[in-house]
Every structure is written in structure tokens, then in C-alpha cells.
């Protein structure tokens, strides 16, 4: 987006905001750094400890090989994450995009999990090479899937999200099965800047420097994409090649940081947002200021960790999300206007579908429900339940089936409504922060009490969900319920919840198995009353959602066009948000926070040919219900008598199936 004739006073004001946004954290970090160094050594000994370390003095060893390398890695990692984040968001034209979007982090995590469990000797030479290899392989898979569509933004985004969810579910499943061997991986997945020598800093410095030089050398082609692919093509450029090269540079930087310090994803999302909000209008300005903002903030966060926690290994990623989320909220509240360019295309089938295809989906749902109830695995192997067992097994299976069916339908419909309202293919019900808020409520209960029962869990999750929703709506409501502010605020809450969950799971508390099952999405504890409540809410949603089809058709045209057509934009968004938030909260309370269903069910519907809003709503609901019922049935039968949470299986099995279906769409 180009800014024309911006007043000089406004430019100076924006420049001062950007300078303060970098210098204030940097000065605070510098003060804390000097204080930490002084606690180890007197200032007069700093230089000699750096250039001529006395190995007989433990203080000099700590200063030279632990403290100073950690400072260097925090700054270098921030620079790399900030620049990779702005490149990915620019190339994919999506303000929610960051390195996790392309599958790099998930691939690195899966590679480390597999190595930890099945090839621990490979870790002897460090985790960096294994993480780098895993991230590179998954990124290559994403690029291969997107290559057929000329690396269009939506192709890269959706492919990356599906690959990330699949790898993440595989990692979570392996860690759940081998809980005692993988607790340290939770720390790595939340980011760790602890250093043992300067090898990582020496390696990371040239890597980030080379990638940064390449990125700025590639500035002109990157700027041409701002005018659109067609305009860039008319000037003799190849948009697909530009996007591939730019993404390769960004992914390389993020992979190097992941290999060095683990997963610190929030800073790559937040730093570009801070730069835009503070007034970085052009791509060059954002490429300059985003890395500086990220570096100063990550440096400060790490120094605060060392100042407060001392020798405790508090994850830097969790701390960044914990401290950065409130700051981002403050910026969003003060922001008057925001345009982040999140509009994009989507996948569709070659042939549109109508009522017969919907009826076929409904039949498939009935068949899946029947199989889930009557077919199972017991002590004697696979078999159909006998007539005498129906009454006994109905008490166990019907609540689970009811919860899975209703929650899946609600996630699917809510995903369609949110993607239609925001015109963002990455938008899922969890993105508005309701699921993240529920998770925060459960985590607070988990930390604050020694015992957890069903009632207290429901109350904590409900309070967290609706308190977070009120906060997100308050922030977005300051600008006519802006979809961009809504998505940024909601994503920040979700990221914060994920970071804190990883931190709690790494604590070693024996109750974490219960928490992990809920976070993974399971129907283990479903009750008849819970099933009835979720079914009632799902039916209400399915009866009200079709009334919004005109809004879903008009809102993607933009606010100006929507008003000219007589649509009350604010009231329409408010009603849609209520239709999304309340069912999402109910579904999350029933089955836990799920990512795959609400994100992918709308894409399944569109790829199947359901293009009209009404048909897409019902198709998404049917797809969501089928996915969750099938996943719940498979989870309780595959490794009987043990069970696998449905949330893990939806992404683990549904991800590859979705990618196959995507390859057949256009």
C-alpha cells in the first residue's frame, strides 16, 4: 500500500514513535545487561574476561561463555525473526502470517521429537542441525504443494498451515505416548536462549547477516508485488519467482533462529504489527524497523527473565508472548486506523455443487455416526455391538458422539462465518481469542488449585473465554469492529495461551496428563447433559447462520461498497461475532481448543464446489461433524484399550487428506 502526500508533521510523529519503540526497550535492556554483568564481574574485568578468559575463575567463564553469548543470541534472533516476519507477511499478503505459517517450526519440532525418542545419539552434536533439517524438509513440502499454483499466497498459507498442524499433532502424539522422555522438548518449543559457549552466536551472526543483505538486495522486486501480481507481471517480473525467492530468504532466517534458540513465534508476528501501527508505511521502513523492534524487545524480555528468575530456565518464547501481548493491546487501542492487506483468494472446485451434494454429505454423516456407535474394538477384537449391549454402550458412546457431532458442526460453521467476514483464509474460530481465553482460564485454575473437577473446569474455561472475548471486542470496537484489529488481538491471546500451556506442560506436574488431553481436544469426559447442550447450541447456530448469507456476500467487497448497498457494517459484524463466539465457546468447553476443524472445514467445502454462502455454511458444518466423529471413533479404537485425543487425529489424519484434495482443486 502506498501513502501519498502524507503531511511532514505526521511523518515526523511516526518517526519519533518508531524511534521510541526501539530505544526505550533497548535502553532498559542495556541497563539490565550492565547490572547482570556487574553481578558476575566488576566492570574493570569485563574486557579482559572477553579477550583473555581465565579458566580458573568461574565468574569469568560464566561471563564469557554464558552471559555475553546469550545477549548476542537474543539480539540476533530478534533481528532474524523481525525481518522474516515482515517478509512473510508481505509476500503472503496476510497480517497473521509468520514462520509457523509455513511449517518450518513444526517440522523442526517433529524432527527433534523423533530424534529424542528413537535416535538420541544424533543429539550428541547438538539440536541445531536436526531442527534445521526438519524445518527445511517441511518447508520444501509446502513449496512443492504451492508450486503448482505459482506460489500464490493462499496456496502457501493453506499448505503451510496443514503441514504445521499435521507435524504438530504427530509431535504431540509422540510426546503424549512417551511423556517421561520429552519434557525438555516443551521448553525448547517455547524458546530457550540459554547458551553454553559462543558457538551458536558465531554461527548465527553470518547467517542473519547474509540473509538480511539478500533481503534488502531483493527490495525492488518485493515492492513490485505491492501493486499486485498482474501489475508485476506487466513490468516483466515473475511474481511466482519473486515469492519463492523472498520466502526462501525468510524461511532460512527463521530456520536458523529455530535451530539456535527454539520456537519464539510471537515476536515474528508482533514486531511487524508494531512497526505498522507506529507508522512504518512503506516496505523499506517496515523492513528496517521490524527487526530493530524485535531485537530490542527480545533482548529486554530475556534480561527481565534473568533478572527475575535467575537460574530457572524460563522459556523466552512464553515470556515474549506474556509481556508482548498487553503491549500490543495498548497499541491497538490507541490506533485509529489500520489496513493490513489481508484480502486474498481461496481454493474452489472445478465444478460447483448444489443440493444433491449436500444430501450426499448428510448421508455420509449418518453413516459415520452409525459406524461410530455400532462398530468398535474390544477385548475380542473388532466387531459389531450385540443387541443386548446397546443400552449399556449407549451411556458411554452416545454422549461422545453427540459432543463430537455438535462441536464439529459448530467449529465448521463458525470458521466459514469468520473467514467470510474477515476475507482471511487463515481465520479460524480460535483466532478471535475465545478458545485461547478458555485455555487461559483452565491454566489459571491448574496453577492456582491443587484439585480440578468438572464443574471448576467449566467455570474457569467459561470465565476465561468470555472475559477474553469482551477484551477483544473492546479493542476491535474502537474502530467499528475492524476485522484486522480483531484478528491481531485474538491471535495474540491464542499465542499467549499456547506459550503458557507449553510452560505448564514443562513443569513436570503429574496433573499435566489431564491438561494435555483437554488441550489436545478429547471427548473422554463427555456427559449426556453436555451432549444435549452442545447439540442444542449447534441447532440454533445452523438455524440462524443462513440468515447472514447476504452479509457474507457483501462484506468481502469492502466497507465502502457494503454501505453503498445499504448494509450496516458494524451491526452486521457484531451479530456475526456473536454467532461465532458463543458456539465456539460452547464447543471449546465441551471438547477443548481445536485448530484443524474450524480452519479447514470451510476449505473442504469450497474445494468440494460449495460456492454460495448458504451451501458453504451447511457443507462446512457437515464436514466438521464428519471429521470429529471419525476422529473420535478412530481415537478410541486404533490402540484400544488406550485412547488418542480426537484433536490430534483430526490434523494427523485429516492433514494429508486435505492436501490431496487441495491438489485436485484449482
Image (tube, rainbow, N blue to C red):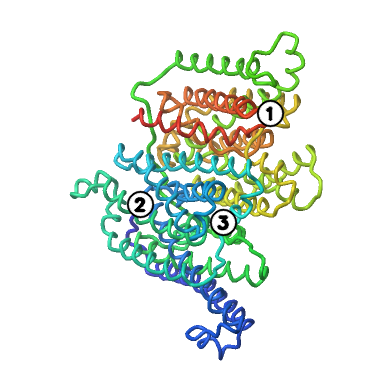
Mark 2 or mark 1, which has the lower sequence index? 2
For marks 2 and 1, give the CA distance: 45 Å
Query: Vertical placement of 47 versus 14: above or below?
Result: below
- Where does the image place residue 381, in percent across and percent down from the top left? 64, 19
- Which residue sits at x=68%, y=13%? 385
Mark toward the start of the polypeptide (1 vs 3) = 3
Distance between the Cα atoms at labels 1 and 3? 32 Å
Q: Residue at x 51, y 61 (%)?
A: 261
Which of the two discs, 2 and 3, labels the residue nearer the N terminus? 3
Camera-near label (2 vs 3) is 3
Kindly state the secondary structure of the residue where label 3 is placed.
Answer: helix
Dot 1 falls on a residue whose secondary structure is loop
In space, the residues marked 2 and 3 are separated at their CA atoms by 24 Å
Q: Residues within 10 Å of mark 1 (few under 14, many from 20)?
A: few
Circles 2 and 3: CB distance less than 8 Å?
A: no
Residue labelled with disc 2: 247
- Kindly identify which residue carries mark 3: 188
Q: Which mark is residue 641?
A: 1
Quadrant of the drawing holding the C terminus:
top left
**Could you say where residue 434 lies in the image, as x and y percent from the top left?**
62, 42
Please identify the residue farthest to the bottom as the structure is shown.
44
Question: x, y percentage for residue 149?
Answer: 31, 37
Crowd band around label 2 with a 10 angstrom C-alpha radius: few (<14), some (14–19), many (20+): many
Q: Where does residue 156 sit, x and y in percent of width and height?
A: 38, 43
Determine whether, in the image, residue 642 is placed left or right of residue 220: right
Outermost residue, front side: 121
Residue drawn at point x = 63 percent, y = 27 percent: 404
Q: Nearer the viewer, mark 1 or mark 3?
A: 1
Q: Residue at x 30, y 37 (%)?
A: 148
Q: Is residue 632 left or right of residue 565?
A: right
Residue 479 visible in the picture:
no
Amino acid at each position: 500500500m502506498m501513502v501519498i502526500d502524507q503531511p511532514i508533521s505526521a511523518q515526523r510523529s511516526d518517526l519519533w514513535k518508531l524511534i521510541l519503540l526501539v530505544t526505550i526497550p533497548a535502553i532498559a535492556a542495556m541497563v539490565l545487561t550492565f547490572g547482570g554483568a556487574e553481578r558476575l564481574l566488576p566492570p574493570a574485568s569485563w574486557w579482559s574476561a572477553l579477550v583473555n578468559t581465565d579458566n580458573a575463575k568461574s565468574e569469568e567463564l560464566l561471563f564469557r561463555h554464558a552471559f555475553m553469548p546469550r545477549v548476542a543470541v537474543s539480539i540476533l534472533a530478534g533481528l532474524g525473526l523481525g525481518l522474516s516476519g515482515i517478509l512473510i507477511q508481505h509476500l503472503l499478503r496476510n497480517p497473521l502470517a509468520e514462520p509457523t505459517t509455513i511449517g518450518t517450526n513444526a517440522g523442526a519440532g517433529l524432527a527433534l521429537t523423533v530424534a529424542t525418542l528413537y535416535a538420541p545419539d544424533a543429539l550428541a552434536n547438538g539440536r541445531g542441525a536436526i531442527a534445521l533439517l526438519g524445518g527445511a524438509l517441511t518447508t520444501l513440502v509446502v513449496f512443492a504443494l504451492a508450486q503448482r499454483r505459482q506460489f500464490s499466497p493462499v496456496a502457501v498459507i493453506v499448505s503451510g498451515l496443514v503441514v504445521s498442524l499435521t507435524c504438530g499433532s504427530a509431535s504431540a502424539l509422540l510426546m503424549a505416548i512417551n511423556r517421561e522422555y520429552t519434557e525438555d522438548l516443551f521448553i525448547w518449543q517455547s524458546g530457550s536462549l540459554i547458551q553454553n559457549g559462543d558457538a551458536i552466536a558465531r554461527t548465527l551472526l553470518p547467517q542473519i547477516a547474509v540473509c538480511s543483505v539478500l533481503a534488502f538486495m531483493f527490495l525492488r522486486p518485493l515492492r513490485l508485488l505491492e501493486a499486485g501480481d498482474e501489475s508485476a507481471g506487466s513490468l516483466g517480473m515473475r511474481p511466482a519467482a519473486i515469492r519463492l525467492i523472498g520466502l526462501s530468504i525468510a524461511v532460512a532466517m527463521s530456520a536458523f533462529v529455530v535451530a539456535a534458540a527454539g520456537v519464539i513465534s510471537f515476536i515474528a508476528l508482533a514486531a511487524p504489527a508494531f512497526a505498522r501501527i507506529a507508522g512504518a508505511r512503506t516496505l523499506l521502513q517496515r523492513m528496517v524497523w521490524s527487526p530493530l523492534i524485535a531485537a530490542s524487545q527480545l533482548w529486554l524480555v530475556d534480561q527481565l527473565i534473568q533478572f527475575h528468575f535467575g537460574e530457572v530456565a524460563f522459556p523466552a518464547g512464553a515470556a515474549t508472548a506474556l509481556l508482548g501481548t498487553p503491549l500490543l493491546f495498548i497499541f491497538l487501542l490507541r490506533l485509529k486506523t489500520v489496513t493490513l492487506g489481508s484480502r486474498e483468494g481461496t481454493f474452489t472446485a472445478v465444478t460447483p455443487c448444489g443440493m444433491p451434494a449436500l444430501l450426499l454429505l448428510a448421508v455420509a454423516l449418518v453413516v459415520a455416526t452409525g459406524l461410530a456407535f455400532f462398530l468398535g474394538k474390544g477385548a475380542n477384537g473388532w466387531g459389531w455391538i450385540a443387541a443386548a449391549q446397546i443400552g449399556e454402550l449407549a451411556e458411554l458412546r452416545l454422549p461422545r458422539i453427540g459432543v463430537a457431532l455438535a462441536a464439529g458442526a459448530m467449529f465448521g460453521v463458525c470458521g466459514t462465518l469468520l473467514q467470510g467476514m474477515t476475507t482471511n483464509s487463515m481465520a479460524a474460530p480460535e483466532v478471535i481469542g475465545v478458545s485461547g481465553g478458555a485455555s487461559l482460564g483452565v491454566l489459571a485454575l491448574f496453577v492456582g488449585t491443587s484439585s480440578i473437577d468438572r464443574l471448576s473446569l467449566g467455570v474457569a474455561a467459561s470465565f476465561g473465554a468470555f472475559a477474553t472475548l469482551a477484551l477483544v471486542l473492546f479493542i476491535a470496537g474502537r474502530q467499528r469492529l475492524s476485522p484486522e484489529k480483531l484478528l491481531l488481538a485474538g491471535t495474540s491471546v491464542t499465542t499467549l495461551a499456547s506459550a503458557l500451556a507449553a510452560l505448564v506442560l514443562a513443569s513436570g506436574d503429574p496433573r499435566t496428563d489431564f491438561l494435555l488431553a483437554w488441550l489436545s481436544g478429547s471427548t473422554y469426559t463427555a456427559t449426556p447433559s453436555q451432549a444435549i447442550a452442545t447439540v442444542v447450541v449447534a441447532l440454533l447456530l445452523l438455524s440462524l447462520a443462513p440468515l447472514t448469507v447476504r452479509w457474507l456476500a457483501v462484506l468481502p467487497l469492502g466497507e465502502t461498497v457494503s454501505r453503498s448497498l445499504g448494509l450496516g457494517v458494524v451491526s452486521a459484524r457484531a451479530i456475526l461475532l456473536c454467532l461465532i463466539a458463543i458456539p465456539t465457546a460452547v464447543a471449546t468447553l465441551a471438547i477443548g481448543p481445536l485448530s484443524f476443524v474450524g480452519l479447514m472445514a470451510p476449505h473442504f467445502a469450497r474445494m468440494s464446489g460449495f460456492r454460495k454462502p448458504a451451501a458453504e455454511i451447511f457443507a462446512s458444518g457437515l464436514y466438521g461433524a464428519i471429521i470429529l466423529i471419525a476422529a473420535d471413533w478412530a481415537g478410541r479404537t486404533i490402540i484400544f484399550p488406550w485412547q488418542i485425543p480426537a484433536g490430534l487425529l483430526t490434523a494427523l489424519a485429516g492433514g494429508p487428506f486435505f492436501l490431496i484434495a487441495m491438489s485436485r482443486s484449482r
